[in-house]
Image (cartoon, grey):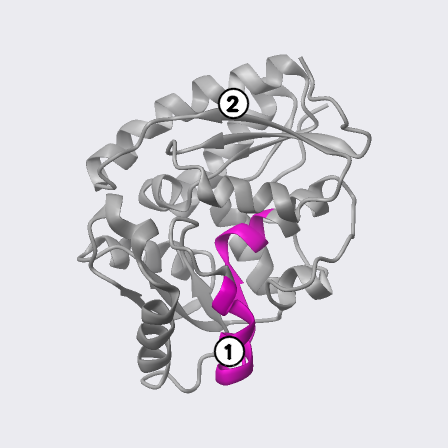
């Protein structure tokens, strides 16, 4: 069943966790008239093995959303697909689009295209993960053709991320950015940290565009539905709605 009040189109979203905050932020950003059909997985630990195992769950939800007749499908959550790897993700997207005759885009492809829209080649990434998984995240972007100067992680328990004060995240980012003054943009992985209030401040203070998870998701949902309705207060990406020179996903087979 398609969502009501979907005059501008419907996106089916597969969310990796049952956290609600980032999803609620997205609903506030999206234009009235965009219908959203959400389905959830239940990632809890934020570990590599869990992300690998999640892919099969994504496929089942993608098939379910395609059966509902949504216009586009967004398997969201960057880590599972970054762990899968850029080339394998691209192959999986092509397979899903061929099998389910619906356009598919992931968080990773949205963020790649957002960076391309700003004509960025060299950027600093930050995440709320600790340890070697950040190298996996960095490699995803490197394989997509970017120079990822660092993927710096705040080492905090996965279930505690929403409790991080945004001013603490701001200080971490600013201190980290000072080590990479030639970065052309800042990428913020994941919607779990409550940081939308610092995006515009970061852009002013660092002098570069910021690509956060939820604004990038909003921007790309609009793009896939052929919309261009700017939203103020969450950074340049959705305030300016820049056009990406490419689309990192593939059109569905006819």
Q: Furthest residue to the right?
A: 7
- The disc label shown at residue 62, or none: 2
What is the magenta range?
Answer: 197-217
Q: Report which quarter residue 52 is drawn in.
A: top left
- The disc label shown at residue 184, or none: 1
**Magenta span has 201?**
yes
Q: Report which quarter residue 187 is drawn in.
A: bottom left
Position of residue 143 in the picture relative to residue 100 (left or right): left
Secondary structure at badge 1 equals loop
| Position of 52 relative to 236 (above/below) | above
Magenta stretch: helix, strand or loop mostly: helix
Position of residue 26 in the picture relative to residue 16 (left or right): right
Q: Position of residue 127 (x, y in %)?
A: 33, 59
Residue at point 72% right, 60% down? 243
Secondary structure at badge 2 equals helix
Q: Position of residue 189 (x, y in %)?
A: 40, 56
């Amino acid at each position: 069943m398609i969502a009501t009040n979907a005059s501008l189109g419907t996106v089916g979203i597969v969310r990796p966790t049952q956290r609600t905050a980032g999803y609620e932020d997205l609903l506030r950003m999206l234009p009235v008239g965009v219908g959203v059909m959400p389905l959830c997985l239940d990632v809890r630990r934020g570990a590599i093995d869990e992300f690998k195992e999640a892919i099969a769950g994504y496929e089942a939800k993608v098939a379910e959303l395609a059966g509902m007749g949504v216009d586009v499908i967004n398997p969201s959550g960057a880590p599972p697909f970054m762990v899968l790897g850029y080339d394998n993700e691209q192959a999986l997207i092509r397979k899903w689009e061929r099998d389910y005759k619906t356009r598919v885009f992931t968080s990773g492809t949205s963020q790649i295209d957002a960076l391309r829209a700003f004509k960025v080649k060299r950027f600093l990434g930050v995440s709320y993960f600790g340890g070697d998984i950040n190298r996996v995240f960095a490699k995803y972007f490197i394989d997509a053709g970017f120079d990822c100067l660092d993927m710096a992680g705040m080492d905090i328990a996965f279930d505690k991320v929403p409790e991080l004060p945004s001013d603490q995240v701001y200080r971490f980012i600013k201190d980290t950015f000072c080590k990479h003054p030639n970065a052309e943009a800042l990428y913020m992985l994941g919607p779990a940290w409550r940081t939308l209030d610092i995006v515009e401040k970061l852009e002013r203070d660092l002098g570069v565009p910021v690509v956060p998870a939820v604004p990038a998701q909003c921007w790309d949902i609009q793009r896939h539905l052929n919309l261009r309705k700017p939203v103020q207060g969450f950074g340049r990406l959705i305030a300016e709605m820049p056009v990406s020179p490419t689309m990192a996903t593939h059109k569905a087979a006819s």
